[in-house]
Image (cartoon, helix red, strand yellow):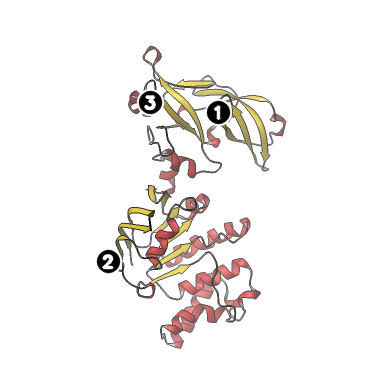
Amino acid sequence: MSYLQLQKIAKRFGDVQVVQEMDLSATAGEFIVLVGASGCGKSTTLRMIAGLESPTSGRILIDGRDVTAATPADRDIAMVFQNYALYPHMNVAQNMSFALELAGTPKAVIAQRVDAAAQVLNIKHLLDRKPKELSGGQRQRVAMGRAIVREPKVFLFDEPLSNLDAKLRGHMRIEIAMLHRRLGKTTVYVTHDQIEAMTLADRIVVMDQGCIQQMGSPDEVFNRPLNRFVAGFIGSPTMNFLNATVKNPDGQLRFVGAGFSCEVPASMKAAAQRFIGQSVVLGIRPQSIKLGASDQGLEFSLRVNVCEYLGTESVLSCSLEAEANGVTLTAPGNHMGLINQMVPVHVSLESIYAFEPGEHGLSLGL
């Protein structure tokens, strides 16, 4: 089994630093997902691992071997791209076997590997078809099969589901997860879709502006975000952020904002002491906001502007006094009747996050 290491890897294009100095490692068989918005450096990082871009500095090791200067063919990796990159004049079997033929692999071995990969991906009945005769999902399976037959040490996926419709993306996520469990290969997967990251990854690497903002399991990055950027990027609908001030009336620390006030949760009190009289940003996930009044936790009133009824639940887009960004909450059932009404809501203290000011403000308590 192989593993991957990036040691202080960085990439610059002229005066633009695309990837800041980065350390990252993947254990044997681990599924790593690089996630972030467009331009954050995730695809450039993947291309450096693949050998399609040369790092400005740092080293890349695969299975303990320094491959920083090695050609893509000498790295023993296989890459699946966003576009399927299939040869239109070749059938499925020929597309899958082409790289092996170039490498001089014996025909019997090629036939065995193509058959085994087609069996795993459920495309044996498609081996004689040309790419133009396949659906988008089938073409993506062929692209994955082409990677599988090479039996590489590391699989690389560059936003492989971006061209598929929503239903097919969901199906292919399951296919990729099952494939990884069968093969047990070290995998690095790039996406801008945080749902893909949450559902596929053993470990998520959240990136922004060429830097790693947080690495951890899906549970860690969702429930214990290190900063405001990670908190806002991971989760759907996205986390709400409310401006507040830390106050200390009668020796009791409180978060006070426009139209709301609550006690500072016990887990944050030590950190909040440093911000008495200063501004902080509260974070509240839409799923944590409950309709109705309560005499415990954080309570305030919202005006419902839009209700998106999704069948089992509604997503309510609301406004709070002096909060330009608005507040989103989810509630079970149909709440179309609440549009243009003021409704009381509450949040338990345990569900509140707090961050230092700024887009990358650190969490006050985990």
Q: Under tag 2, what secondary structure?
A: loop
Marking on residue 243: none
Q: Decide if residue 40 is on the left or right side of residue 10.
A: right
Name the side, left or right, on which 292 lies relative to 202: right
- What residue did someone put label 1 on? 323
Q: Secondary structure at mark 1?
A: strand
Rounded to the nearest angstrom, the CA distance separating label 3 from label 1 is 26 Å
Q: 313 or 87, which lies in front?
A: 87
Quadrant of the image occupied by residue 129: bottom right
Looking at the rendered image, the disc whose residue lies closer to the viewer, 3 or 2, is 2
Marker disc for residue 64 = 2
C-alpha distance separating marks 2 and 1 = 52 Å
- Comparing marks 3 and 1, which lies closer to the viewer? 1
- Identify the residue under disc 3: 266
Whole-percent x, y for residue 165 in the image: 63, 58
User: Circles 3 and 2: CB distance less than 8 Å?
Assistant: no
Residue 34 place in picture, x, y as percent:
43, 55
> Quarter-wise, where is residue 4 in the image?
bottom left
Tell me if residue 203 comes above or below residue 84 in the rendering.
above
Q: Residue at x 54, y 70 (%)?
A: 121
Could you classify mark 1 by the number of other residues whose Cα lies within 10 Å: few (under 14), some (14-19), or many (20 or more)?
Answer: some
Single out the mark in the foreground, 2 or 1.
Answer: 1
* Front residue of 291 and 163: 163
